[in-house]
Amino acid sequence: MAFLTTDRLVLRDFTGSPDEVEEVYALHDDPEVMRFINGGKPADRAMIRERTLPDMMRGFPAFGGRPACWAAEERTTGRFVGWFALRPVGGARSTVADLGYRLRREVWGLGYATEGARALVDKGFRDLGVEEIVADTMTVNARSRRVLEKAGLRFVRQFTTDWPEVIEGSEQGDVAYALTRAAWDAGRRAAG
């Protein structure tokens, strides 16, 4: 069942099917997709099946028990292109949500990341009771930074974190982005 539909995408709940295990595994096993996540290390199919996918299907009290991660498919073909997430940060009454996404390399540059991220930002503020949306990425991840900015989030700060394993570019730190409901509302009023 669709959670959210855009011009070109359908975001739907994960079901945990064997096909989804394979799709998520292939996505997480692509070294370019994972370059800024874990340095491009190979994925573990059992980990995807036993931990990653169940975590994507977990419900959040802040969203009335709904999951906060959705499979993304092309509307016209039904082809799996990746996933998007808007996970509550903190406790059951949290009004802050963390925006995330991961897309197959063959759809990079088609605007799907921006389209899905913008739709989730709008959905979060309109329907999910979110008051602030946050996201972070590596400083050197220019593509992801552009997507966050196109989705309306603004640069907040640069920071460094001690990661268990150093990956290329991590010496430049990470960047945090955020958008409040008030700023989102003001932007809508100015545009309309």
Image (cartoon, helix red, strand yellow):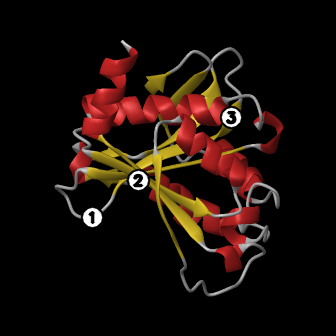
Under mark 3, the amino acid is Phe
Under mark 1, the amino acid is Gly
Residue at position x 79%, y 67% from top?
A: 40
First reached walking from the N terminus: tag 2 or tag 1? 1
Residue 186 picture location, percent across and down: 29, 28
Sort mark 2 into few (<14), some (14-19) or many (20+) by Cα contacts within 10 Å: many
Residue 89 picture location, percent across and down: 32, 60
Residue for badge 3: 80
Residue for badge 2: 134
Helix, strand or loop under label 1: loop
Give above or below for 102 relative to 162. Answer: above
**Cβ atoms at labels 2 and 1 below 8 Å apart:** no
Instruction: Compute the Cα span from label 3 to label 1.
Output: 30 Å
Residue at position x 57%, y 28% from top?
A: 115
Mark number, residue 90: 1
- Which quadrant of the figure contains the N terminus? top left
- Which quadrant of the figure contains the C terminus? top left
Helix, strand or loop under label 2: strand
Depth-wise, is mark 3 or mark 2 nearer the camera?
2
Instruction: Compute the Cα span from label 3 to label 2.
Output: 25 Å
Residue at position x 55%, y 44% from top?
A: 148
